[in-house]
Image (cartoon, coloured by chain):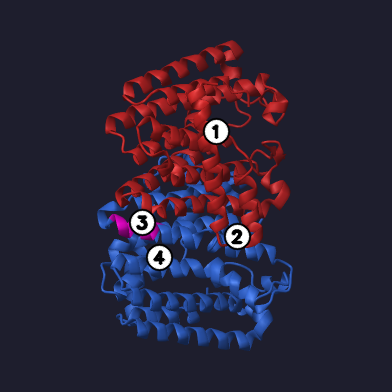
Chain colours: A blue, B red
Amino acid sequence: MNQHLEHFLNTHKQQVEDALRHYIEQVEAPAQLKEAMAYSLLAGGKRIRPLFLLATIDALGGKVEQGLPAACALEMIHTYSLIHDDLPAMDDDDYRRGKLTNHKVFGEALAILAGDALLTHAFFVLADAAQSFKPEQQLMMIKELALRAGPAGMVGGQTADVLGEGARLSFDQLAYIHAHKTGDLLVCAVRLGCYVAGASEDQLVHLTRYAREVGLAFQIQDDILDEIGDEQKLGKQVGSDRGNQKSTYISLLGLEGAKQALSEHVALAKQAVQAAGVKPDLLLALADFMVSREY
Amino acid sequence: MNQHLEHFLNTHKQQVEDALRHYIEQVEAPAQLKEAMAYSLLAGGKRIRPLFLLATIDALGGKVEQGLPAACALEMIHTYSLIHDDLPAMDDDDYRRGKLTNHKVFGEALAILAGDALLTHAFFVLADAAQSFKPEQQLMMIKELALRAGPAGMVGGQTADVLGEGARLSFDQLAYIHAHKTGDLLVCAVRLGCYVAGASEDQLVHLTRYAREVGLAFQIQDDILDEIGDEQKLGKQVGSDRGNQKSTYISLLGLEGAKQALSEHVALAKQAVQAAGVKPDLLLALADFMVSREY
């Protein structure tokens, strides 16, 4: 891994972990609800979205630590979506990141409620971060998060995914699902970073494009890893998409076609960074990291 | 019903309905998700929380229509909580307000997602209402909503309710559940009204107390109606709490004790209104309405 990126990830991933723990400890709630929230939130995820958010701030010359409330809010949203996605009525998964899923440990009712609690608390964290921001800035960020995470964003993508299950999807349908189900939170991460650091309208446009392309690359890599990844590193079985006859970039483009699409989207992402007129190193390295990750 | 109240409810309930429909129509989302959101949101509820919010504004001499975004956001939160509460993993209810519950019509996965979407969109609506408010005011309202609806509020109360199921609860445990599961959204309604109308800190304190007392009265009345209400008017079976051996105000205080507690809380609510130094009529009439309602 690029040294600059490695240093950045090492430093700031721990900051994100600490901040997440802090936010959960502050919650006043029944002990079991707090435990269920913490179980999934502090399960040692990759923290990709928070790190994109913080890297965007760095690229724009802003103060990285200022992004922690937004980074944590975003990770709460991401985590709630995983808890709800894993439910029996949805993907019915028993394991996530090598650990039992939330409902397997706490039961379905608590898992639904822990998800609802994390989703709601994300907005509290953002709205409560008044010391770091102008109120106008905070409102923009809250609106951004609600838009990208809501029915027009992540929940819309997840719905399309659920409705498309078992069906043979067109490339456009698959692209819609990915743009929203996984793409929108990455776009949100980068745009929140832009708001924190006070990016220009022009930079916001280019960096949004960057995030969109990286999000696609990320999803294609996910499909590739599901096909040929290392079960140990992934913490889950491979080949499940094929087993479920799920439409993926592999089923639509073949493995080689998917790998080529992946490279193309990474190249487009890099062009967008160069066009944005920011310190490019970290964002370029993050785009490469998406392609080379093994889990 | 008090004429002043009747006129107020007739006028403003329709405004709330129209605004809710408008907000749903504006959502860009897969058609089935929008349909599932609208199904429950536009199912003709009593709109009690929005009406308390608007009545508080009126009592404070504010412009009632200014409260519509907050009133709709609050009703979206209330509606999502009903959708998730009705799920098989929670209360497993087939009917709500005399209609099939969301998951009975759209399936469990869509019901979970429609709930998530309404919850998220509530924050979009509040954060997007910039034309009516100062940004500081909006942030206070978003924070209030997230606090009262989240783990420290409604979701915390719902968790305590789920965990206490089948157990014989103490009066304190029951009071905790009601203060949060149903009470916090009513408190939120009145406090949002206070923020919209620019109440003084003193008024905020008294009117919060008003809402807290009305919320308790409301819940006691719910328990009474479950015991002796009219199934036709309620749109659901009565006696289900007793059948489920659920701890209620009736099981703890007996029917007469519950009726007395109801009167006491209404009296305390009225004292709080008088202490707040606002136009009292509407809020007093609403408190009485809580006691006399039959559904």
Viewer-proximal residue among A138 and A6: A138
Name the residue rendered at 64%, 85% in the picture.
A255
Residues at circles 1 and 3 in contact by the CB criterion of under 8 Å = no
Task: Name the amino acid, label 3.
Answer: Leu
Identify the magenta region. Answer: A135-142
Dot 1 falls on a residue whose secondary structure is helix
Nearest-to-viewer mark from 2 and 3: 3
Nearest-to-viewer mark from 2 and 4: 4
From the top left corner, tell me how far across and down residue B139 is, in percent.
34, 49
Image vertical order of residue B90 relative to residue B33, above or below: above
Image vertical order of residue B115 relative to residue B171, above or below: below
Nearest-to-viewer mark from 4 and 1: 1
Q: Alpha carbon of mark 4 to alpha carbon of mark 3: how far?
A: 19 Å
Looking at the image, residue A204 sits to the left or right of residue B29; the answer is: left
From the top left corner, tell me how far across and down residue B120 is, in percent.
50, 53
State which quadrant residue B110 falls in. bottom right
Q: Are marks 4 and 1 on the same chain?
A: no
10 Å crowding of disc 3: few (<14), some (14-19), many (20+): many
Of mark 4 and mark 3, the one earlier in the sequence is 4
- Per the image, the residue denoted by label 1 is B10
Viewer-proximal residue among B59 and A114: B59
Residues at circles 4 and 1 in contact by the CB criterion of under 8 Å = no
